[in-house]
Amino acid sequence: ESVLTQSPATLSLSPGERATLSCRASQSVSSYLAWYQQKPGQAPRLLIYDASNRATGIPARFSGSGSGTDFTLTISSLEPEDFAVYYCQQGRTFGGGTKVEIK
Amino acid sequence: EVQLVESGGGLVQPGGSLRLSCAASGFTFSSYAMSWVRQAPGKGLEWVSFISGRGISTDHADSVKGRFIISRDNSKNTLYLQVNSLRAEDTAVYYCAKEGLGSGRGMDVWGKGTTVTVSS
């Protein structure tokens, strides 16, 4: 099973700014990668599947890219409700998470 | 509405046992694999257990292998996790999640979680 490393651990940005989150796999996972958002006290929510496909109801400002070992989640313009923790996942493995906080 | 509702968590002493349940509704339960994922206080997500749609295939994380057992009753649309020989490090919120169809589809429906606290 591949190990997933997310960076940075924390991203401090202002509303309206662009957020770029990274997830690196220790071995190729093809495009089999998902991204989740989790807010305090809530369950995770699926944002992106198969590396680049938005899940149902996810706004277009969220986009995913990458294949093989390097993946990116981009939030084009941060809304107040986007400040949360984001996880990547492949198979039985989750990354350690990136917290997007208000600067 | 597609929904997962967990129950069965609580406070248990080290070495004790619990059975967690996850009631599913709004989709054809038997058509989908399911997983349990946990989150210790202040920590990230950790996959715990997986079961295929018909219950033929199961898998558990090394950290719980031999102590936790995942099962399902498709006639009751319910997923279970029997947790035995509990340790302090098993303290967490336990979520059940519906697996998407395909390797990269992720877990597209999550319950709100049930809390397990292991303490004397």
Image (tube, coloured by chain):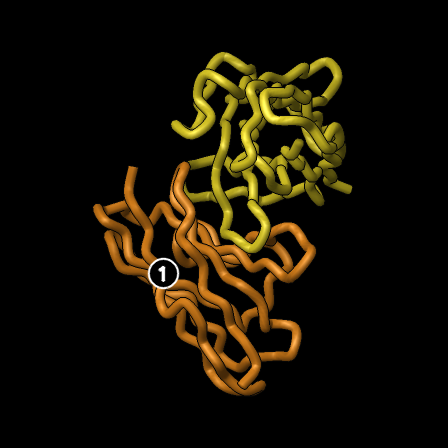
Image x and y of residue B45, in percent: 50, 47
The residue located at (65%, 79%) in the rendering is: A80
Q: Residues within 10 Å of mark 1 (few under 14, many from 20)?
A: many
Which residue is the site of mark 1?
A: A6
Residue found at the far front of this picture: B120
Image x and y of residue A4, in percent: 33, 51
In this view, the residue in front, A101 or B110, is A101
- From the viewer's perspective, tell me whether residue A68 is left or right of residue B25: left
Q: Colour of chain A?
A: orange
Question: Which chain is yellow in the picture?
Answer: B
In this view, the residue in front, B1 or B5, is B5
Image x and y of residue B18, in percent: 67, 22
In this view, the residue in front, B41 or A53, is B41
Residue found at the far left of this picture: A27
Q: Amino acid at mark 1?
A: Gln
Q: Describe the element under mark 1 as helix, strand or loop.
A: strand
